[in-house]
Image (cartoon, grey):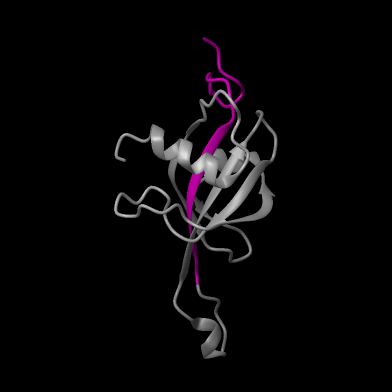
């Protein structure tokens, strides 16, 4: 079995879930030094090298104590580098940490964030 340029051999749309910690900005204004903010990014790459459809999630979709799916807000598409990348982001945008990634194996491709998250939850052993 041969993989693509990034070594992934499995066909189908790929997803990555990132925990995104936004660090407080350094400023004299105490209001802008509020506590760090956390959200999660769901990115789906429909084909290798393409930008990924991306949603901002208000909570961890893999939290075993949470039954409801998180609220998902579409945001700007993310580059394919986030399939591999973990660490600090440029321009003081915070830090990302990968919490899951894989290939969607649905017969009918999921289009909404809710459908994708449901498929991910069903394929995650800890759920």
Residue at the top extreme of this rendering: 1
Q: Is residue 121 left or right of residue 41?
A: left
The residue closer to the viewer here, 59 or 37, is 59
Residue 89, quarter of the rendered image: bottom right
The residue closer to the viewer here, 20 or 68, is 68
In the rendering, at what x and y percent does residue 11 appear?
Answer: 57, 20
In this rendering, the count of numbered labels is 0
Q: Is residue 37 left or right of residue 124?
A: right
In the rendering, at what x and y percent does residue 48 appear?
Answer: 65, 28
Question: Is residue 84 something that shows in the picture?
Answer: no
Q: Is residue 66 left or right of residue 116?
A: left
Residues rendered magenta in the picture: 1-23
Q: In the image, what residue occupies the spot 34% across and 51% down?
A: 63
Q: Is residue 5 magenta?
A: yes
Q: Main secondary structure of the magenta part?
A: loop
Q: Is residue 50 magenta?
A: no
Q: Quadrant of the C terminus?
A: top left
Residue at the bottom extreme of this rendering: 29
Residue 112, quarter of the rendered image: top right
In the rendering, at what x and y percent does residue 99 appear?
Answer: 41, 46
Q: Is residue 5 above or below residue 90?
A: above
Q: In the image, what residue occupies the spot 53% across and 63% down?
A: 94
In the rendering, at what x and y percent does residue 114 appear?
Answer: 53, 46
Question: Is residue 79 something that shows in the picture?
Answer: yes
Q: In the image, what residue occupies the spot 43% across and 50% down?
A: 61
Q: Is residue 57 above or below residue 101?
A: below
């Amino acid at each position: 079995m041969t993989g693509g340029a990034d070594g992934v051999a499995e066909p189908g749309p790929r997803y990555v879930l990132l925990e995104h910690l936004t660090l407080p900005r350094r400023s004299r204004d105490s209001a802008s030094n509020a506590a760090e903010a956390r959200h999660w990014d769901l990115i789906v790459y429909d084909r290798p090298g393409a930008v990924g459809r991306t949603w901002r999630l208000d909570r961890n979709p893999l939290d075993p104590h949470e039954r409801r799916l998180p609220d998902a807000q579409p945001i700007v598409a993310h580059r394919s580098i986030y399939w591999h990348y973990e660490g600090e982001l440029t321009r003081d945008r915070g830090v990302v940490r990968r919490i899951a990634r894989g290939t969607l194996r649905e017969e009918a491709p999921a289009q909404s964030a809710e459908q994708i998250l449901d498929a991910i939850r069903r394929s995650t052993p800890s759920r």
